[in-house]
Image (spheres, rainbow, N blue to C red):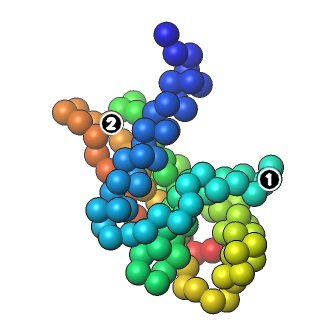
Amino acid sequence: MLRGGEEAMKRGEKGEEQAVNHLLEQGCRIAERNWRSGRKGEIDIIAYDGEVLVFVEVKTRSRGSLGGPLEAVTAAKRKQLTRLATDYLYRTGLYGRVDCRFDVVGIMSAPGGVKLEHIRDAFRG
């Protein structure tokens, strides 16, 4: 039997896989998954939507969770994602060379299945 943390991790991994499949169906190209910058944190998915580089935060919620995926991305999380994205752009030599946006993909278990919500350009960095 999985503990609460392990169960949440498995749910998160499954949610990220569903988000990747959704992005691919939308015509995006996946550049990175679970990109880490040392101990600063992680960006769940980095993808290209045409020529736009998209930093994607995936939020997986169970039935009983309150609030939608955008509410789960707090001001502190947005700040962290912005710093991580800037770090990624500098490390890859893309800073100032590509248009970027931040998306949030929410995966919520719902009666009868899973509901996916994709919020494009969810916040500004």
Secondary element under disc 1, as helix, strand or loop, is loop
The residue wearing badge 1 is: 38
Q: Position of residue 80 (x, y in %)?
A: 70, 60
Query: Is 46 situated left or right of 80 in this image?
Result: left
- Viewer-proximal residue among 5 and 18: 18
Q: Can you name the residue that lies furthest to the top here?
A: 1
Quadrant location of the C terminus in the rendered image: bottom right
Q: Which residue is mark 2?
A: 109
- Tell which of 117 and 52 is nearer to you: 52
Amino acid tagged 1:
Gly
At 51% across and 71% down in the image, what residue appears?
Answer: 54
What is the quadrant of residue 26 in the picture?
A: bottom left
Q: Position of residue 59 (x, y in %)?
A: 48, 47
Can residue 72 be seen here? The reply is yes
Earlier residue among tags 2 and 1: 1
Q: Residue at coordinates 33% horizontally, 57% vertically from top-left?
A: 22
